[in-house]
Image (spheres, helix red, strand yellow):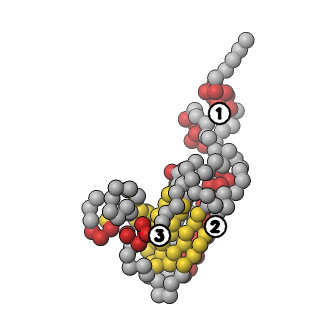
Amino acid sequence: MNSSSGAQRAGARRAKGGGRGVCAQRGWESELAETAESLGVRTEWVERQGATSAVVRVSVSYTIEEDSVRQALPDGNYIEAHISIAQPRIDSVTAYSQVDEIAREFRNVIDRIRDALSPRAEVHLFYAGPVSLGVSLGRQVSHNIHNSTLVYNYQRQALPPYAWAILVNNAEPTVRFVGGQHV
C-alpha cells in the first residue's frame, strides 16, 4: 500500500505546474478557494463642499468607527467613503473572487476621489482586514496616478487609536504621527 502525505501531493502538483504562485513554490497550499459567494461589498459616501482630503474606511474583519477616524483627523474637512461587507468579521474572506471584488471596489473609490479632488489632496486609509487583502488593495494605488495615500496603523491602547500612518505611494515611504505625537 502506498500512501502519500499532503506535502507529497502538493509537490506532485508543483511538478505538474499546478498550484498558485509563491504558495506552490514554497511547498504549502493556499487556503483560499477560487470562488465563493459575494460578501455584499458596498460603499457609502459622504461628500462635503470644499473638502481638502478624503478618508477611506475599509471594514472587512471589523467595522472601523467614524469616531476613531475623527480622533485622528478632527477637522472633518474630507470626503468620506466607507467600503464594507455585509457582515464584517474575522476570516470572512475565503476566496480569490472575494479579494478581487473588494479590490475592484477600492480601485473605483480611489479613482473617484482622484477625479473629485486636487492632485495635492491626501487620501487617509483606515483598514481592518486580512493582510492578503491589504496587499491586493495596495496594488491598486498608483504612485503616479492617485493622490498621496496615508495608511493608518491601529493600536487599541493608543490615544488616538490611529496614532500614526505611512505615506505609501511616495518615492520613499514616510511615517507621519497624528498631532506630532510619537508613539
Q: Which residue in the structure is indicated by mark 2?
A: 42
Disc 1 residue type? Arg
Real-space Cα separation, disc 3 to disc 1, in angstroms:
46 Å
Q: Which residue in the structure is indicated by mark 1?
A: 14
Q: Is residue 79 left or right of residue 161?
A: right
Q: Position of residue 120 (x, y in %)?
A: 43, 79
Looking at marks 3 and 1 on the same chain, the residue that comes earlier in the sequence is marked by 1
Q: Position of residue 102 (x, y in %)?
A: 62, 60
Is mark 2 in CB contact (under 8 Å) with mark 3?
no
Real-space Cα separation, disc 1 to disc 2, in angstroms:
37 Å
Task: Judge whether residue 12 can be spotted in this image.
Answer: yes
Disc 3 crowd rating (10 Å Cα; few below 14, some 14-19, many 20+) is: few
Task: Judge whether residue 121 can be spotted in this image.
Answer: no
Real-space Cα separation, disc 2 to disc 3, in angstroms:
17 Å
Disc 2 residue type? Arg
Look at the picture and state if 47 lies above or below 84: below
Look at the picture and state if 139 lies above or below 47: above
Disc 3 residue type? Glu
Q: Which structural element holds mark 3? A: helix
Which quadrant of the view contains residue 2?
A: top right
- The one nearer the camera, 163 or 10, is 163
Is mark 1 in CB contact (under 8 Å) with mark 2?
no
Looking at marks 2 and 3 on the same chain, the residue that comes earlier in the sequence is marked by 2
Q: Which residue in the structure is indicated by mark 3?
A: 66
Q: Position of residue 129 (x, y in %)?
A: 52, 55
Q: Which structural element holds mark 2? A: strand
Q: Nearer the viewer, mark 3 or mark 1?
A: 3
- The one nearer the camera, 133 or 73, is 73
Identified at 41% across, 72% down, the residue is: 70
